[in-house]
Amino acid sequence: MTVLPFPADRTSLPAPPATTPASTLPSDGEVCGAFSAPSGARGRFTGTYRLERLRSEFGQLTAAGVLTGELVDVDGAPVALGSRRHTAAAELVSDESRHVVRIGPVDVNIAGFLVTVEEIEVTVPRDLPSAR
């Protein structure tokens, strides 16, 4: 495991970018969740999910991928950066133009913190470019 130190003087850190309110369900691999921060409050996890493959395990569709993101305390102080490979049960919904993979909610250990990640939705186009 790699531990990244954060500076004690947080005034030199750049301000986070302004965000617009997101829909209730993240899409295209964006993820968010919550964890118990060292301060004792509920911290926030934000990041991405990279879908690597879908497979069938014991008759259940599963999605294997990598969760990557930042853990932030309730006051906005960074706690950790981390990533974790994760396989979870998934649901696949398809229409004429795309496949939608729904995963979760799931509990994942990221940087030593148990993070409850909200439902993830990844959209995959039906017509993928051909490999040459």
Image: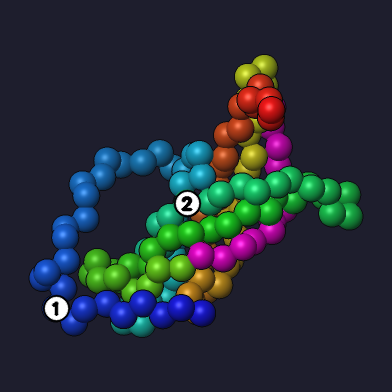
Q: Residues within 10 Å of mark 2 (few under 14, many from 20)?
A: some
Q: Is residue 60 left or right of residue 85?
A: right
Q: Looking at the image, can residue 91 be seen?
A: yes
Where in the figure is residue 92, as x and y percent of width and height?
71, 37
**Cα distance, mark 1 to mark 2?**
28 Å
Quadrant (top left, top right, bottom left, bottom right) of the C terminus: top right
Q: In this view, does 92 lie to the left or right of 125?
A: right
Mark number displayed over residue 9: 1
Asked whether 103 falls inside the magenta stretch, the response is no
Residue visible at 24% across and 66% down in the picture: 76
Amino acid carrying label 1: it is Asp
**The residue stretch that appears in magenta:** 83-94
Q: Looking at the image, can residue 126 be seen?
A: no
Where in the figure is residue 114, as x and y percent of width and height?
52, 74
Mark 1 in CB contact with mark 2 (< 8 angstroms):
no
Q: Mark 1 or mark 2: name the one nearer the start of the chain.
A: 1
Above or below, 105 relative to 18 = below
Mark number displayed over residue 96: none
Amino acid carrying label 2: it is Thr
